[in-house]
Amino acid sequence: TTYTYNTTDNRLDPSSGTDLSATWEFAGVGGTEKFSKYILDSRHFWPWKWGTVFSAHGQLGYVHDLGGDSEDVPIDERFFLGGIYSLRGFESREVGPRDEFGDFIGGDTEAYFNFEYIFPLVKDLGLKGVTFFDVGNTWNSEDFWGEDDDAFASWRYSAGAGIRWLSPMGPMRFEYGFNLDARDYEDNGKFDFMIGRFF
């Protein structure tokens, strides 16, 4: 079930307004998987001078097994961050908890935020530039609330820039993000490309 509230002026390339959604997914009747998943998503756009736009996006999520044990949540329902849809500058789905073998296992709790400044490059062609700052992570709830780990100290950060084109085929994004706190197993940055909604 999803509830939405949208006041943006353009669904593909908004420059003002708010887009809010709250999603609840329940799996527990007639199946082997029994879990409940909650996601809050918020996007805001503020027009400024010379056709520029400030935007902010945030998403919070939590999933748990109906028996109360987050470890029993199916791995494909857990939260993975990284990539153009969440934390740019990181490989897709490679931000979050790992097991003893170094494999990413996803978290039951997520929080991430994206901040952007968008400016026109060639207005007649629908060509724009963007600078951005992303922050967030995924955790297992016992780590997030536990005394041994400070979840807020484990936020991951990235920043970068890119070009966006409102092409005849749809919105295109070409963006490069710098991993601001790269770990030994991570690259210092990553290029991303996609066709679809800008933000």
Image (cartoon, rainbow, N blue to C red):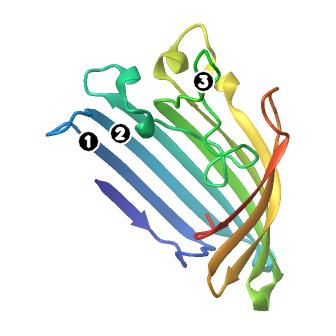
Residue drawn at (52%, 72%) of the image: 8
In this view of the protein, which residue sits in the foreground, 56 or 99?
A: 99
Q: Which mark is residue 173?
A: none
Check disc 1 and report the residue beneath it.
26
Residue 93 screen position, x and y as percent: 60, 41
Q: Nearer the viewer, mark 3 or mark 1?
A: 3
Residue 19 screen position, x and y as percent: 49, 63
Q: Quadrant of residue 13?
A: bottom right
In this view of the protein, which residue sits in the foreground, 199 or 70?
A: 70
Q: Quadrant of residue 151?
A: top right
- Against 189, residue 4 (above or below) is below
Check disc 3 and report the residue beneath it.
98
- In the picture, the quarter occupied by the C terminus is bottom right
Residue drawn at (62%, 65%) of the image: 45
Q: Secondary structure at mark 1?
A: strand
Q: Secondary structure at mark 3?
A: loop
Labels 3 and 1 touching (C-beta < 8 A): no
In this view of the protein, which residue sits in the foreground, 165 or 72?
A: 72
Residue drawn at (78%, 75%) of the image: 128
Left/right placement of residue 4 relative to residue 32 reads right
Q: Residues within 10 Å of mark 3 (few under 14, many from 20)?
A: some
Q: Which mark is residue 37?
A: 2
Labels 1 and 2 touching (C-beta < 8 A): yes
Q: Nearer the viewer, mark 3 or mark 2?
A: 3
- Against 91, residue 68 (above or below) is above
- Of the numbered discs 3 and 2, the one sitting upstream in the chain is 2
- Of the numbered discs 3 and 1, the one sitting upstream in the chain is 1
- The amino acid pointed to by label 3 is Arg
Q: Quadrant of residue 138?
A: top right
- The amino acid pointed to by label 2 is Lys
Q: Residues within 10 Å of mark 2 (few under 14, many from 20)?
A: some
